[in-house]
Amino acid sequence: MVSTTPDPHLSFNRHCHCVQVSYSLRDGEGDTVDLGRLHTVALTIEGELWVWGRGNHGQLGLGDEANRLAPTLVGAQAAFGGSTVLTVACGDCHSLVVTKDGSL
Protein backbone atom coordinates (compact mmCIF):
# COMPACT_ATOMS: atom_id res chain seq x y z
CA MET A 1 0.00 0.00 0.00
CA VAL A 2 1.30 3.47 -0.90
CA SER A 3 0.98 6.17 1.74
CA THR A 4 -0.57 9.44 0.55
CA THR A 5 0.76 11.26 3.61
CA PRO A 6 3.86 13.34 2.90
CA ASP A 7 6.95 11.82 4.50
CA PRO A 8 8.65 14.49 6.67
CA HIS A 9 12.00 12.74 6.09
CA LEU A 10 11.72 12.93 2.31
CA SER A 11 13.92 15.69 1.00
CA PHE A 12 15.00 16.80 -2.43
CA ASN A 13 18.02 18.79 -3.48
CA ARG A 14 16.70 22.08 -4.88
CA HIS A 15 20.06 22.78 -6.48
CA CYS A 16 20.38 19.68 -8.65
CA HIS A 17 21.14 20.01 -12.33
CA CYS A 18 18.87 17.62 -14.17
CA VAL A 19 18.77 16.21 -17.67
CA GLN A 20 15.48 15.64 -19.50
CA VAL A 21 15.10 11.96 -20.38
CA SER A 22 12.38 10.07 -22.24
CA TYR A 23 12.72 6.35 -22.64
CA SER A 24 10.65 3.71 -24.38
CA LEU A 25 11.06 0.23 -22.95
CA ARG A 26 10.10 -1.80 -26.03
CA ASP A 27 11.94 -0.63 -29.15
CA GLY A 28 9.89 2.53 -29.58
CA GLU A 29 6.57 0.81 -28.93
CA GLY A 30 4.93 0.25 -25.60
CA ASP A 31 5.85 1.43 -22.16
CA THR A 32 7.18 4.99 -21.96
CA VAL A 33 8.91 6.67 -19.03
CA ASP A 34 9.55 10.41 -18.79
CA LEU A 35 11.44 12.25 -16.07
CA GLY A 36 10.82 15.69 -14.65
CA ARG A 37 13.21 17.42 -12.32
CA LEU A 38 12.16 15.38 -9.28
CA HIS A 39 9.29 13.23 -10.52
CA THR A 40 8.68 10.39 -12.97
CA VAL A 41 5.70 9.44 -15.14
CA ALA A 42 5.31 6.05 -16.81
CA LEU A 43 2.69 5.08 -19.39
CA THR A 44 2.24 1.35 -19.96
CA ILE A 45 1.30 -0.27 -23.25
CA GLU A 46 -2.03 -1.09 -21.57
CA GLY A 47 -2.66 2.64 -21.03
CA GLU A 48 -1.99 2.74 -17.30
CA LEU A 49 -0.43 5.96 -16.03
CA TRP A 50 1.96 5.61 -13.08
CA VAL A 51 3.62 8.51 -11.23
CA TRP A 52 6.11 8.93 -8.39
CA GLY A 53 8.51 11.45 -6.87
CA ARG A 54 7.97 14.98 -5.69
CA GLY A 55 4.42 16.26 -5.94
CA ASN A 56 4.63 19.70 -4.32
CA HIS A 57 3.19 21.48 -7.39
CA GLY A 58 0.56 18.84 -8.17
CA GLN A 59 2.75 17.54 -10.99
CA LEU A 60 1.86 13.93 -10.19
CA GLY A 61 -1.76 14.52 -11.19
CA LEU A 62 -3.21 12.84 -8.12
CA GLY A 63 -5.22 15.79 -6.86
CA ASP A 64 -2.87 16.68 -4.03
CA GLU A 65 0.66 17.96 -3.44
CA ALA A 66 2.02 14.90 -1.61
CA ASN A 67 5.26 13.17 -2.52
CA ARG A 68 5.12 9.50 -3.56
CA LEU A 69 8.09 7.22 -2.94
CA ALA A 70 6.62 4.35 -4.96
CA PRO A 71 4.84 4.24 -8.34
CA THR A 72 1.19 5.21 -7.89
CA LEU A 73 -1.53 4.50 -10.43
CA VAL A 74 -3.37 7.57 -11.74
CA GLY A 75 -7.02 7.02 -12.59
CA ALA A 76 -6.23 8.08 -16.15
CA GLN A 77 -9.52 7.01 -17.72
CA ALA A 78 -11.56 8.97 -15.17
CA ALA A 79 -9.13 11.90 -15.14
CA PHE A 80 -9.28 12.41 -18.90
CA GLY A 81 -12.96 11.89 -19.59
CA GLY A 82 -12.52 8.26 -20.59
CA SER A 83 -10.08 9.11 -23.37
CA THR A 84 -6.99 6.92 -23.63
CA VAL A 85 -3.63 8.54 -22.84
CA LEU A 86 -1.33 8.27 -25.87
CA THR A 87 1.85 9.94 -24.63
CA VAL A 88 3.37 11.67 -21.62
CA ALA A 89 5.98 14.37 -21.07
CA CYS A 90 7.44 15.98 -17.98
CA GLY A 91 8.95 19.37 -17.35
CA ASP A 92 10.68 20.78 -14.32
CA CYS A 93 7.56 20.90 -12.12
CA HIS A 94 4.77 19.75 -14.43
CA SER A 95 3.52 16.75 -16.37
CA LEU A 96 1.60 16.67 -19.64
CA VAL A 97 -0.42 13.97 -21.37
CA VAL A 98 -1.95 13.82 -24.82
CA THR A 99 -5.13 11.78 -25.10
CA LYS A 100 -6.66 9.93 -28.04
CA ASP A 101 -9.28 12.67 -28.49
CA GLY A 102 -6.47 15.23 -28.90
CA SER A 103 -6.68 16.85 -25.48
CA LEU A 104 -3.51 18.10 -23.82
Image (cartoon, rainbow, N blue to C red):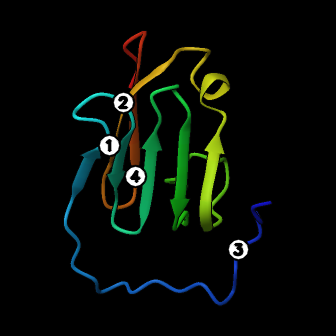
60 or 27: nearer the viewer: 27
Structural distance between the alpha carbons of marks 1 and 2: 7 Å
Q: Amino acid at mark 3?
A: Pro
Structural distance between the alpha carbons of marks 4 and 1: 22 Å
Q: Position of residue 75 (x, y in %)?
A: 66, 34
Mark 3 lies on residue: 6
Mark 4 lies on residue: 94
Label 1: state its secondary structure.
loop
Structural distance between the alpha carbons of marks 2 and 4: 22 Å
Label 2: state its secondary structure.
loop
Q: Position of residue 14 (x, y in %)?
A: 36, 84
Tell me the tag on residue 30: 2
Q: Residue at x 56, y 46 (%)?
A: 61
Q: Nearer the viewer, mark 2 or mark 3?
A: 2
With respect to residue 78, does 55 lie above or below? below
* Quadrant occupied by the C terminus: top left
Q: Tell me which corner region of the image, top left, top right, bottom left or bottom right, holds residue 65.
A: bottom right
14 lies left or right of 68: left
The furthest residue to the front: 26
Mark 1 lies on residue: 25
Mark 4 and mark 2 in contact (Cβ < 8 Å)? no
Q: In the rendered structure, which disc, 1 or 2, sits on the residue that comes first in sequence?
A: 1
Q: Residue at x 75, y 61 (%)?
A: 2
Q: Nearer the viewer, mark 2 or mark 4?
A: 2
Q: Residue at x 69, y 86 (%)?
A: 8
Mark 1 and mark 4 in contact (Cβ < 8 Å)? no
Q: In the rendered structure, which disc, 4 or 1, sits on the residue that comes first in sequence?
A: 1
Structural distance between the alpha carbons of marks 2 and 3: 31 Å
Mark 3 and mark 1 in contact (Cβ < 8 Å)? no
Mark 2 and mark 1 in contact (Cβ < 8 Å)? yes
Q: In the rendered structure, which disc, 2 or 3, sits on the residue that comes first in sequence?
A: 3
